[in-house]
Amino acid sequence: MSKINEIKRKKASTGKTAHITHALELVSSSKLSKITEKKLQVEKYADLLSEMIGNLAESCKKEFIDNFITPHQQNKVIGYVVVSTDRGLCGNLNTVLFRKVIEHMQEAQSKKQGIVICTIGNKATEFFEKHDLPVLESYAKPDLSPDTTLSACQKMIYQYTEKNVNTIYVFYNRMISILEQRPVQQQLLPIPKTPRSNQVHNTEYIFEPKREDVIKSLIDRYIRYTVYQAVVEGAASEEAARTMAMKNATENANKIIDALQMSVNKARQADITKELSEIIGGAEAIN
C-alpha cells in the first residue's frame, strides 16, 4: 500500500496547486474586467490629446515646436522607457517584450547610438540590471491614475530637454484580446505627428490665461498620458496573460490529478489481484 499512499500524497499536493491557480485565475479575471473599461477610456482621451497637440503645432510653431516637435539635428542617444510587470506568473509576457527592446537596442548600437533606460516595473529593472545595461531611473508599477505617472520619466525628459537624449521610445505590452498580448514601440519625444495633424489648420486659437502656460500644460499632460496609457495597457496585458496562464496551469494540474487517480486505481487493482492469487494459492495448497 506504500505505493498507493505515495500516489495519493502527490494527488493531494497537485490538488492544492490546482485550487491556488484557479483562485489566481478568478482574481486576475476580475481585475481584467475593471482595467479593460479604463483602458478604453484612456485610449480615447490620449487620441484626442494627440490630435490637439498636432493642431497646435501647426498654429503655434515658434512657441514649442523646436523643443518637443522637431527632431534634434543629431540623433546620438536613444532613451527607452520600458513598462513591465512587478510580478511573475504571467507566461512569457515580459520575455517577449524584453526581446523586442533588445533588438531595437542592438540596431541602435550598430548605428553607434548610445542608449539609456527608464524602467517602470520590477521585472524590467531586474532584467536590465542583470545584463549591466544603463538604467537612468526605475519605478515600481504605479497605481492606475494619471497623477501617479507624473513623476515617472522625469530624469529622462529632462535629459531630452537638455539635448543629452535625442529620441525617447516607450515599450509596453498592448492587450489585443485575452488570448493575445503584443509588445508595442511608441515614440514619446519628439512628439510624432498624427495623420490628422498633417492637415492644414487655419484656426486662430485664443489662449487664457497665457499662451505659454496653456501650451506647457498640454505638453505636460500629453507626456503624462502617453506614459499612463502604456501603464494601463501593460496592466491589462498582465492580467489577461495571468488569467490564461493560471487557467492553463489549472487544466494541466487537473490532467495530472486524473492520471494519478488512474495510477491509484491500477495499483489498487494490482494489490487486489495479488491478494486473490495468494488466497487461491493458499486454498489449493490446503487441498
Image (spheres, grey):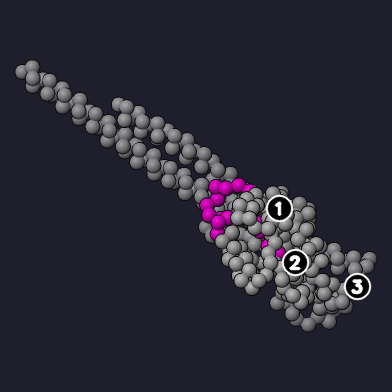
Disc 3 vs disc 2: Cβ atoms closer than 8 Å? no
Q: Amino acid at mark 1?
A: Ser
**Distance CA(mark 3)–CA(mark 2):** 33 Å
In the rendered image, the residue lying farthest to the top is: 286
Q: Residue at x 44, y 46 (%)?
A: 251
* Displayed quadrant of residue 169: bottom right
Q: Residue at x 77, y 74 (%)?
A: 72
Q: Nearer the viewer, residue 101 or 255?
A: 101
Quadrant position of the C terminus in the picture: top left
* Displayed quadrant of residue 165: bottom right
Q: Is residue 282 left or right of residue 216?
A: left
Marker disc for residue 138:
1
Tell me which numbered mark, 3 or 1, is placed earlier along the sequence: 1
Mark 2: which secondary structure? loop
Is residue 248 highlighted in magenta?
no
Q: Amino acid at mark 2?
A: Val
Say which residue label 3 marks. 206
Classify 113 as above or below 274: below
Classify 234 as above or below 56: above
Quadrant position of the N terminus in the picture: top left
Q: Is residue 162 left or right of residue 178?
A: right
Say which residue label 2 marks. 165
Horizontal and vertical percent for residue 70? 78, 75
Magenta segment:
79-97
Classify 65 as above or below 280: below
